[in-house]
Image: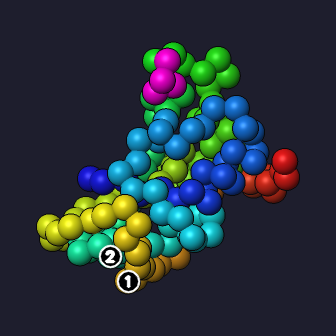
Amino acid sequence: PDLSTTAASRRARHQRRPAGGQMEQFRPNFVVSGVAAWEEDSWKVLRIGDVIFDVVKPCSRCIFTTVSPEKGQKHPSGEPLATLQAFRTAQDNGDVDFGQNLIARNSGVIRVGDEVESLATAPAIAYGAARVGGRVSPAEPPVAS
């Protein structure tokens, strides 16, 4: 699958803790700008350039996001995964999500700067903090920097 993220969601994560978390650490194929943070959570079908994509599931993030692409070293405090666990843990399955996995329906041309059009949406899944004591804690509000 391809991976789509949004610049606004990365900024929202970065506002909570600036350490770690360059977009390259998430390894996206597409970074969408001009939309609200976490808007991608409700996308079900997208058109980017000539290609239509099914948005099949949120991208569950692993420890690899804590490794600097420039230095090849793990972040000492496990960022950005540690911050994501505090507010992007899926309440239905405990996965820590950032971005959406896409499957192309067709082949076609996609260029930098192409418009991204949401063709279908659905309610987003619920997120909160990592499980503590057998329950999901509510997410804390973002902290302004």
Amino acid type, callout 2 = Arg
Q: Nearer the viewer, residue 41 or 3?
A: 3
22, above or below 77, in the image: below
Asked if residue 136 shows in the view, the reply is: no
Cβ atoms under marks 1 and 2 closer than 8 Å: yes
Magenta stretch, residue numbers: 67-71
Q: Earlier in the sequence, mark 1 or mark 2?
A: 2
124, above or below 135, in the image: below
Q: Is residue 53 magenta?
A: no
Q: Report the magenta stretch's main SS.
A: loop
Left or right: 93 with respect to 2?
A: right
Q: Nearer the viewer, residue 87 or 18?
A: 18
Residue 118 locus on image (x, y percent): 42, 79
Amino acid type, callout 1 = Leu
The residue sitting at 27% across, 65% down in the picture is 110
Residue at which label 2 appears = 47
Residue at which label 1 appears = 119
Q: Residue 51, located in which quarter of the rendered image?
A: bottom left
92, above or below 54, in the image: above
